[in-house]
Image (spheres, rainbow, N blue to C red):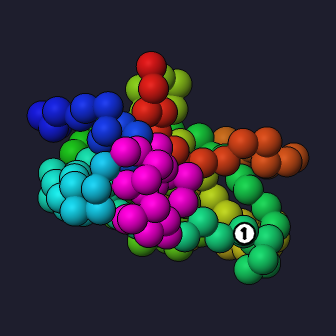
Amino acid sequence: MTTSLDAYDLKLLAELQRDARTPQSELGLRVNLSTAAVNRRLKRLSDEGVIERYSAVVAPEALGYELSIIVEVEVESERIDQLDALKRSFQACPQVQQCYYVAGECDFVLIFAVRNMAQYNELTRELFFENNNVKRFKTLVAMSRVKVGLDVPTQP
């Protein structure tokens, strides 16, 4: 990414990550810019892909997703077509909140939000046991959510 970010951009991004519903006029007051300047900067940051999307953070428990599960997946083959197929299956699963293709002892790390162990069991059948390219997987059940977020630090 070749976008150059100045101090105003970083302040705006910090404020948006805190609450994306903040009106542009209020953002301007907080970062010492006019509403029009805030609007131009936000449009540029969106157009350049710095801001990927705006969304709401929903409490999983409010929708009945009581368990957070972290899974390490090791693949049988790293052929690109098989890896791509596996990535697509993970992307298509609504219970997979995050998916990382990683270097190290495993090939993928997945973060699941599930209602209960029965739901996770069913997902393991669909995503892992029925996939010939999954060599093994390791399940870690979160005891509590200590820190969850996607905020990117805006200060060094």
Please check the rendered image and state whether residue 28 is part of the magenta-colored stretch, yes or no. yes
Q: Which residue appears at 12% of the width and 34% of the height?
A: 2
Task: Say left or right for 115 vs 7.
Answer: right
Note whether residue 75 is visible.
Answer: no
Q: Quadrant of the N terminus?
A: top left
Determine the secondary structure under disc 1: helix
Q: Residue furthest right?
A: 143
Circle 1 sits on which residue?
60
- The magenta segment is 13-32
Considering every residue shown, the one lying at the far left of the view is: 2
Name the side, left or right, on which 32 lies relative to 98.
Answer: left
Residue drawn at x 78%, y 77% is 62
Q: Quadrant of residue 57?
A: bottom right
User: Residue 90: horizontal and vertical position, in percent?
Assistant: 45, 61
Residue situated in front as seen by the camera: 32 or 40: 32
Query: x, y percentage for residue 130?
Result: 52, 65
**Residue farthest along the bottom direction in this orientation:** 63
Magenta region, main secondary structure: helix
How far across and how far down the image is residue 36, in percent?
Answer: 22, 62
Task: From this view, report whether residue 103 is shown above or below residue 66.
Answer: above
- Considering depth in this image, is 104 or 34 the residue closer to the camera? 34
